[in-house]
Image: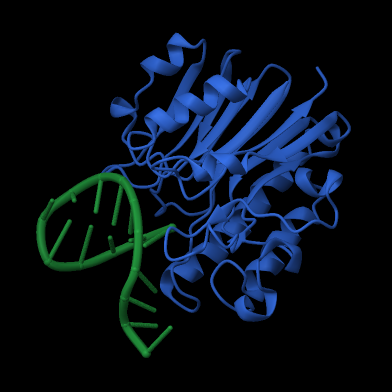
Chain colours: A blue, B green
Amino acid sequence: MKIATWNVNSIRARLPVALEWFDAARPDLALLQETKVVPEQFPAEPFEERGYNVVACGEAGGRNGVAILAKSPIEDLREGLPGDLEDQEARYVEAMVRDLRVASVYVPNGTQVGSERFAFKLAFLDRLRSHVASLLEDEEALIVGGDYNVAPTPLDVFDPALLEGTICYHPDERAKLRALLHLGLYDAYRIGEPRTPAYTWWHYQGRSWRANQGLRIDHLLLSPQAADRLETCAIDRDVRAARAPSDHAPVWCSLTD
DNA sequence: ATGGTGGCTTAGCCA
């Protein structure tokens, strides 16, 4: 079973690139972020034609947005991350697909270290940790995939000294992501590639992509029951070289059935 | 040093 996560940066703007990738990669399950569309306007038909069930979550104004696409039925759907009644942003959805519990997460970027949005990001990571702790009590195969907007280690940023303390690589954010992992989750990419620098996001500006100056901020985090079934995990970085690409590349893994 | 790029929505925000 092939499971992918991808921040598409607008599913409508990315539709040709997204369909091309779905046709080539053929994931059984895809967790999308930053779809930037209200559910009624999510372009579900071309995906349904390809055999996918589509669950899209969006907010008024079409900001953020997360989705789950799966070839098997999507059941026991839960929208929104508990812990903040004022948080109406569409950044979390979870469901059961076959014997797998999955979540698509779009952690707030945080905009600027020290800002209100940064505090919201740190609080969101705390809420995610609390919620994942309760999910792990079920001892199921669980995959929490998404754009975490945090690069966990020096291997995950193109210049650790330069970027130390900046957004997506601030010690407070890394500590929150580590706290999440310390619940007993596995970073699927690092199981197979413990020492190789690798990125999933490159800025649109300047020479970021051309010079491979990226960050690894998109992660598939696996419960022990899912990690025991892991076969492969990879980053489809070629997708970032497409015409009119997302600034993020898809990350996928395969689990034994 | 507050640029640079992109998407959504309309000049400003968020990323």
Q: How many labels does the image show?
A: 0
Q: Residue at x 48, y 25 (%)?
A: A20
Quarter of the image for residue A164 reads: bottom right
Relative to A46, say whether A174 is above or below: below
Q: Which residue is drawn at 85% across and 38% down?
A: A224
Q: Position of residue A214 (x, y in %)?
A: 59, 60
Residue projecting furthest to the front: A210
Q: Position of residue A156 (x, y in %)?
A: 70, 61
Quarter of the image for residue A137 reads: top right
Residue projecting furthest to the right: A228
Q: In this view, does B11 lie to the left or right of A226?
A: left
Residues A159 and A100: in front is A159
Q: Which residue is drawn at 49% across and 79% down?
A: A114
Q: Position of residue A5 (x, y in %)?
A: 60, 37
Q: In this view, does A88 lie to the left or right of A109?
A: left
Q: Is residue A230 left or right of residue A201?
A: right
Q: In which quarter of the image is the C terminus of chain A?
A: top right
Q: In which quarter of the image is the N terminus of chain A?
A: top right
Residues A54 and A159: in front is A159
Q: Is residue A33 left or right of residue A162?
A: left
Relative to A206, say whether A8 is above or below: above
Relative to B13, say whether A196 is above or below: above
Residues A118 and A250: in front is A250
Residues A210 and A34: in front is A210
Q: Where is residue A109 in the image (x, y as percent from the top left)?
A: 48, 61
